[in-house]
């Protein structure tokens, strides 16, 4: 193999190495983003559960109020 060919192979290897490093960086960023999204999903799920509980409690309170008003009318 001549000197020029060796240089071309070396350049190609360097380019591949850079591409691999870029790929690793992108994968790392995507992994971090996935963790952030998972955390946000867990937070929103907890918030939803709190809201559903609040709605259920308010509905029960309204029913109790209606029953109390009916008893007081009688």
Image (cartoon, rainbow, N blue to C red):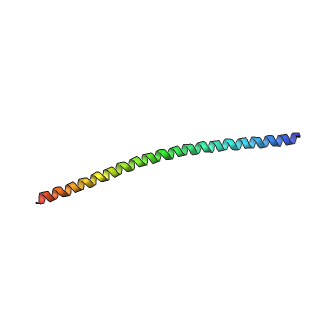
> Hey, which quadrant is residue 21 in on the image?
top right
Q: Which residue is drawn at 63% across and 42% down?
A: 25
Please state the horizontal and vertical placement of residue 72, each as a whole percent of the image: 12, 57
Residue situated furthest right in the rendering: 2
Q: Residue at x 66, y 43 (%)?
A: 22
Please state the horizontal and vertical placement of residue 56, each as a whole percent of the image: 30, 53
Asked if residue 26 lies left or right of residue 46, the reply is right
Please state the horizontal and vertical placement of residue 13, each as a whole percent of the image: 76, 41
Q: Which residue is drawn at 13% across and 57% down?
A: 71
> Hey, which quadrant is residue 32 in on the image?
top right
Please state the horizontal and vertical placement of residue 73, each as a whole percent of the image: 12, 60
Residue situated furthest left in the rendering: 74
In the rendered image, the quadrant that contains the N terminus is top right
Asked if residue 74 lies left or right of residue 29, the reply is left
Q: Which residue is drawn at 24% across and 56% down?
A: 62
Count of labels shown?
A: 0
In the rendered image, the quadrant that contains the C terminus is bottom left
């Amino acid at each position: 193999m001549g000197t020029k060919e060796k240089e071309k192979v070396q350049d190609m290897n360097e380019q591949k190495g850079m591409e691999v490093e870029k790929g690793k960086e992108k994968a790392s960023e995507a992994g971090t983003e996935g963790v952030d999204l998972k955390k946000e999903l867990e937070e929103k799920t907890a918030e939803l559960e709190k809201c559903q509980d609040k709605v259920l409690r308010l509905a029960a309170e309204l029913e109790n109020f209606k029953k109390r008003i009916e008893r007081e009318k009688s």
